[in-house]
Image: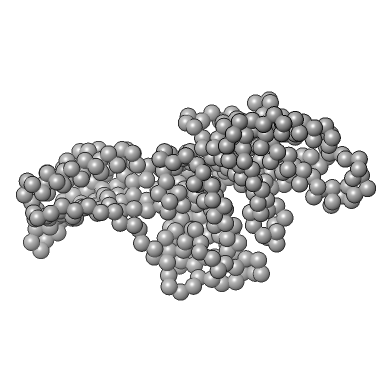
Amino acid sequence: MNKQSIAKLNLFLIGLSSRFDDNSSIFKSINVIYKTGLKNFKGTGQYDNGNIKFNFNGITNTISISELLEIICNEALNYDSLTLTYSERGTDILIEADNKNVKMKNIEVKDESPKESTSYEFNETSTLLNRNYYIKVGKADNLLKKIGIMSDNGKIKNDKIRKYNQIDHYVELFDEMLTKLPRNKVINILDCGCGKSYLSFVLNYYLTEVKKIKCHFIGLDYKESVIETSKKMADNLGYRNMDFFAIDIKDYVPKNKINIVMSLHACDTATDMALATGIKLNSDAIIAVPCCQKELLGQYKYEPFKNILKYGVLKSRMADILTDGMRSLMLEARGYDVSVVEYISPLETPKNIMIRALKTKEENEDLMSEYFNLMSILNVYPSLYGFLNEW
């Protein structure tokens, strides 16, 4: 290739070097094919702890991205043309260069969804729905297989259809909040009581590869075993924009601003720990899907309802409503706009409430007074209030 084309190529490669510095956590590979006449000479590079392990002509070296791109540029002098593909999660950048021209373009990773429907019934409440899924079969196959929802032959497992529907609907409800979050910076998401972190992996895929939003996930759980499982899964998926810690939620101190705190099916007062963490960290958004709510059941009393609450099942259901209602009121009092929605159909599970909160204003003293009044009337001391004042 002539020096004029090499100079243009070098400008594009400088841009790739800067991109790698900004987006190394989602970098996948770099491949280059040199051509001379009918002969092709291929070089392949993979991420290796901040550097690139590059193989060309049977020789493998681990070098920095800037060193690699300098080598690629210098090597191009010996060939008629080159094609370079720089791959990130969800996006490929293609550079084509010869003696006449140098071109660069972004290539969206194509949807490889199968033409035939993958829908089959499992039971009345667990079928693939007639909807445009956010986590699509085809594009997300690798993720769905790794988290056990899809079989090796590319079909959603019958006994995982319910889970697939639930996860996808969570993503839909999450997506509705994205336009109200800070833009043009990394979104830091804290998953409290993350367990095996399947939801974080799904959201990571969606934000990074579908929405093209920079994000970083932190998963917290007190169980060492599930944290190790999450770390291995992240390695298997190549998701380097994730950290996991075996730690009590209240002991975690973030290094950066936390934008979203989320919690899925954290039992009883573990949900309150997550909500308190989000409030304490002044996070932009808090999303919680509570599981069992036992705490207020043994505390609350309300004399006007005594002849209704003598029925155990009704008292239990009222305790659930009071628990999530007071959680929502506390969030509003602390400056959040709150919505309470059905996460999934009540036919699936009665524990189907999602609390979504967006920080929009300063604390509201009137609502806080109302919260205190409810504590007095109901004779309760919610853990959320305790965590906020004791941590």
Q: How is the image coloured?
A: one colour
Residue 193: image x %, image y %?
A: 60, 41
Image vertical order of residue 57 relative to residue 137, above or below: above
Give whichever of 265, 130 is nearer the camera.
130
Image vertical order of residue 376 relative to residue 317, above or below: above
Using the rendered image of the protein, determine whether residue 50 is visible from the camera's viewpoint.
yes
Image vertical order of residue 228 relative to residue 44, above or below: above
321 relative to 161 in the view: left or right: right
Dividing the picture into quadrants, the one containing residue 281 is top right
Image vertical order of residue 84 relative to residue 263, above or below: below
Q: Give the farthest residue toward the top.
A: 390
Q: Residue at x 64, y 43 (%)?
A: 338
Q: Residue at x 70, y 38 (%)?
A: 329
Residue 389: image x %, image y %?
A: 68, 26
Residue 124: image x %, image y %?
A: 66, 69
Q: Residue at x 55, y 35 (%)?
A: 283
Using the rendered image of the protein, determine whether residue 224 is visible from the camera's viewpoint.
no
Q: Residue at x 51, y 44 (%)?
A: 180
Dividing the picture into quadrants, the one containing residue 350 is bottom right
Give whichever of 239, 284 is nearer the camera.
284
172 relative to 332 in the view: left or right: left
190 relative to 83 in the view: left or right: right
21 relative to 352 in the view: left or right: left
Q: Give the farthest residue toward the bottom.
A: 116
Q: Give the farthest residue toward the right.
A: 307
Locate the C terminus by quadrant. top right
Give whichever of 364, 256 is nearer the camera.
364
Residue 307: image x %, image y %?
A: 93, 48
Tally of numbered tags: 0
